[in-house]
Image: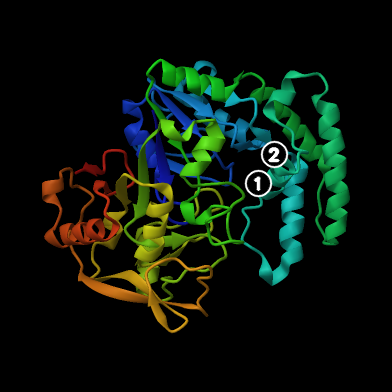
């Protein structure tokens, strides 16, 4: 069976930390979608690590890490990630496997991304400008370039054809994008050279055989469920399926082989970039969450928008993913709030509703809150569930009752050790 680990909000929930914590129990960690627009932050032994494409189990000797077919890879960023890992003496050659069917992000994909976003003006969607959208567009348009192409002598010819097409498209946007493609290509070719030193595999066959042999597999998602291309807050979403279904298509796993679905959420809510956010705070409480929680994007460095926990959106994510276990992150950030609010319903077109409607823009939706008593204790040194303050236990019990799923882990800090199992 393959267990899934998913973010249940707008990303940045702390998936990287939890994968790192859980890896000791798995033989294979497999990333199934997204690209270097994701930033998974891990912290242990006093060192902070940020991964973008490489699965979060890479620091454990016991696990093989697989980059699946649903992922899009930028060889330039990938090389930088590998360079950053050199000092840790990880046996990358045997521990990191790349799907031949994963698509490549070309330099011109990034340029197209920038041109498209610039052309939108004030209507921009908040792209990370990593070329993710244009790469997935080429994939679905059957024009994309896959990792497996690099095993053939004709790959540069295919690259040139696609890059020329992209340059013509950039002209169509009629915006001033300054670039030196020759310089970008030099960096790209260096990245490809590094990528070709790794093992390329037919990942769906590899995962199938691993299941046959009884290996324990954890599928790791990027971004969050509310950024899913089908079920997220479209068009302010990413370009892939971030929900449980994405693991089936992004790794070639049959639906009846999915085991536990582990859902991660913050004790409050954050969002990076544009798009609707019903519980967003513009007051001192929101500022405190952002400051105490160090809420800046791991990939872009952009400040995250902060707000109270949105149970309507969270229930929706639990429902569409079939979540079996929950993990609540950053409980420590809420320490010190006298009152904690939870959005339990929306006022939508004059009615009170408890499901996520088609449009959650602030002109259509007003959050309805329940208030709970806060806690003042510093949680960051706590190691056992019995140490948690009563008000936090009440908060957890309330969420479990509403969501009908147990909260098995409570994170009380960014370090690997600041993780309480319940």
- In the picture, the quarter occupied by the C terminus is top left
Question: On the picture, is 38 further left or further right than 8?
Answer: right
Residue 165 in sight in this render:
yes
Counting from the top left corner in percent of width and height, residue 8 is at: 41, 52
Q: Compare marks 1 and 2 and give the one earlier in the sequence.
A: 2
Q: CA distance from mark 1 to mark 2?
A: 7 Å
Q: Quadrant of residue 52?
A: top right
Task: Give the vertical position of 249 relative to 345 (above or below).
Answer: above
Counting from the top left corner in percent of width and height, residue 353 is at: 39, 73
Tell me the tag on residue 132.
1
Q: In the displayed image of the protein, which residue is found farthest to the front?
A: 256
Residue at horizontal 43 percent and vertical 61 percent from the top: 270
Residue under numbered circle 2: 105
Q: Quadrant of residue 293?
A: bottom left
In the image, 268 versus 380, the foreground residue is 268
Is there CB contact under 8 Å for labels 1 and 2?
yes
- In the picture, the quarter occupied by the N terminus is top left
Q: Under tag 2, what secondary structure?
A: loop
Counting from the top left corner in percent of width and height, residue 216 is at: 37, 24
In the image, 414 versus 216, the foreground residue is 216
Q: Under tag 1, what secondary structure?
A: helix
């Amino acid at each position: 069976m393959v267990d899934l680990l998913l973010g249940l909000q707008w990303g940045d929930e702390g998936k990287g930390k939890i994968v790192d914590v859980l890896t000791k129990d798995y033989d294979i960690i497999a990333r199934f979608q997204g690209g270097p627009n994701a930033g998974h932050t891990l912290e242990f032994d006093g060192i902070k690590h940020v991964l973008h494409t490489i699965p979060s189990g890479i620091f454990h000797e016991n696990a093989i890490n697989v980059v699946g077919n649903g992922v899009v890879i930028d060889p330039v960023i990938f090389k930088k990630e590998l360079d950053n890992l050199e000092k840790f003496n990880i046996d990358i050659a045997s521990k990191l496997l790349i799907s031949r069917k994963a698509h490549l992000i070309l330099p011109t994909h990034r340029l197209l991304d920038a041109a498209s976003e610039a052309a939108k003006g004030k209507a921009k969607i908040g792209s990370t400008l990593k070329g993710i959208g244009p790469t997935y567009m080429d994939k679905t348009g059957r024009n994309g370039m896959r990792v497996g192409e690099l095993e053939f002598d004709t790959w540069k010819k295919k690259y040139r054809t696609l890059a020329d097409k992209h340059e013509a498209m950039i002209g169509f946007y009629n915006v001033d994008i300054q670039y030196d493609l020759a310089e970008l290509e030099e960096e790209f070719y260096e990245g490809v050279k590094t990528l070709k030193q790794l093992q390329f595999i037919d990942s769906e066959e590899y995962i199938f055989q691993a299941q046959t042999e009884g290996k324990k597999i954890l599928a790791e998602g990027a971004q969050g469920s509310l950024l899913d291309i089908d079920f997220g807050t479209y068009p302010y979403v990413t370009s892939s399926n971030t929900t449980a279904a994405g693991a089936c298509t992004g790794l070639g796993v049959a639906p009846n082989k999915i085991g536990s679905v582990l859902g991660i959420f913050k004790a409050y809510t954050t969002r990076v970039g544009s798009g609707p956010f019903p519980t967003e705070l513009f007051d001192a409480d929101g500022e405190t969450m952002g400051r105490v929680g160090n809420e800046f994007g791991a990939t872009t460095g952009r400040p995250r928008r902060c707000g109270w926990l949105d149970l309507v959106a969270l229930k929706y994510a639990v429902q569409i993913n079939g979540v079996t276990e929950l993990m609540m992150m950053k409980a420590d950030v809420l320490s010190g709030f006298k009152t904690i609010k939870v959005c339990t319903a929306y006022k939508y077109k004059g009615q009170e509703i408890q499901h996520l409607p088609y449009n959650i823009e602030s002109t259509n939706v007003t959050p309805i809150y329940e208030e709970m008593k806060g806690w003042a204790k510093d949680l960051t040194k706590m190691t056992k569930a019995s140490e948690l303050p009563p008000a936090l236990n009440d908060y957890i019990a309330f969420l479990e009752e509403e969501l009908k799923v147990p909260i098995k882990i409570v994170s009380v800090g960014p370090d690997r050790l600041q993780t309480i199992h319940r």
